[in-house]
């Protein structure tokens, strides 16, 4: 047997073995956490996911930093202008594009950038020689005027026209459209006008009705080639008459922010009203 004795070398800790074991355990735990995070993360990451979740074609992809209108000035602006011109071309000339002159720009969730997209799409169409009217129909939270760089404070707008207090021609605000090379509005063949949101009555659903929207659309299309509505949230009643009357509904989603639940909810909501 082994008689009691003093060991010459320490029996622990076994530093080398412990380091190897700890490293392996850390790698394994990290991989498990990464897999779990990916499985639980339902945010939009890829183009294929967007097409599947919305069950609709992707018309275009816009770059980050679309915080205002495209002026055509500077390298970054040149890229934005080219991207928006491509979006306009895809909407006009491809099978996934525009099916009529009326476009409703909605979003899959809050703060996805629909107002910025509506403003820049209007500018791109006007640059292409079209007469365009953009309507700020998000009456509760109007933002389209900010994206176009104007302040329509105390001006009549959409609500005033729908209630019959103002003629549509009096409420329209002309917008200077920069040319694609930044030379200014003189080189632009088209025309861009804004119909602001106007006052905020209560309840809005009594003002934004199917009949009122149809009448307004006919009047605006008499002076415009394209009519773009900046939509209220799809969760409120006044969005429904606009969606039903529109020839096209363009949904704005954001990579890394739009979730699968938001996309499917937007798709189901539109399908329920026959859009």
Image (cartoon, grey):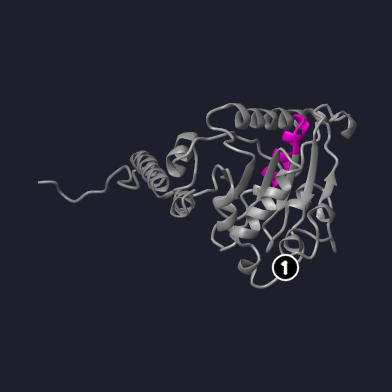
Count the numbered circles shown.
Answer: 1
Task: Write the residue at 64% across / 48% down.
Answer: 114
Q: Position of residue 225 (x, y in %)?
A: 71, 37
Q: Position of residue 259 (x, y in %)?
A: 48, 49
Give SS at disc 1.
loop
Task: Give the labeled residue for mark 1.
Answer: 200
Q: Quadrant of residue 241?
A: bottom right
84, above or below 19, in the image: above
Task: Write the residue at 61% across / 67% down.
Answer: 205
Q: Is residue 268 magenta?
A: no
Task: Write the residue at 76% across / 44% down.
Answer: 68
Q: Is residue 122 magenta?
A: yes
Chief SS of the magenta region: helix
Q: Position of residue 37 (x, y in %)?
A: 42, 47
Q: Could you tell whether 51 is left or right of 214 in the image?
A: left
Disc 1 crowd rating (10 Å Cα; few below 14, some 14-19, many 20+) is some
> What residue range appears in magenta?
115-131
């Amino acid at each position: 047997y082994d008689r009691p004795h003093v060991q010459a070398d320490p029996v622990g800790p076994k530093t080398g073995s412990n380091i190897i074991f700890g490293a392996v355990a850390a790698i394994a735990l990290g991989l498990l956490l990464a897999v779990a995070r990916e499985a639980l993360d339902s945010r939009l990451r890829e183009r294929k996911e967007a097409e599947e979740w919305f069950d609709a074609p992707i018309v275009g992809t816009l770059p980050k930093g679309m915080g205002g209108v495209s002026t055509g000035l500077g390298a970054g602006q040149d890229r934005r202008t080219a991207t928006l011109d491509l979006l306009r071309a895809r909407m006009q000339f491809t099978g996934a594009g525009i099916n009529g002159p009326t476009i409703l720009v909605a979003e899959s969730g809050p703060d996805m950038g629909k107002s910025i997209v509506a403003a820049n799409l209007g500018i791109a169409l006007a640059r292409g020689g079209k007469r365009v009217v953009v309507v700020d129909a998000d009456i509760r939270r109007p933002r389209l005027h900010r994206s176009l760089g104007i302040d329509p404070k105390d001006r009549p707008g959409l609500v005033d026209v729908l209630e019959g207090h103002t003629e549509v021609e009096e409420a329209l605000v002309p917008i200077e459209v920069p040319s694609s090379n930044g030379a200014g509005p003189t080189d632009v063949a088209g025309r861009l006008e804004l119909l602001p949101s106007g006052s905020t009555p209560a309840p809005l659903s009594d003002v934004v009705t199917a009949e009122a929207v149809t009448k307004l659309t006919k009047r605006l299309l008499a002076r415009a080639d394209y009519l773009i509505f900046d939509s209220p949230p799809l969760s409120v009643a006044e969005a429904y008459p606009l969606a039903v009357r529109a020839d096209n509904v363009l949904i704005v989603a954001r990579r890394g922010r739009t979730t699968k639940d938001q996309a499917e909810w937007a798709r189901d909501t539109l399908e329920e009203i026959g859009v």
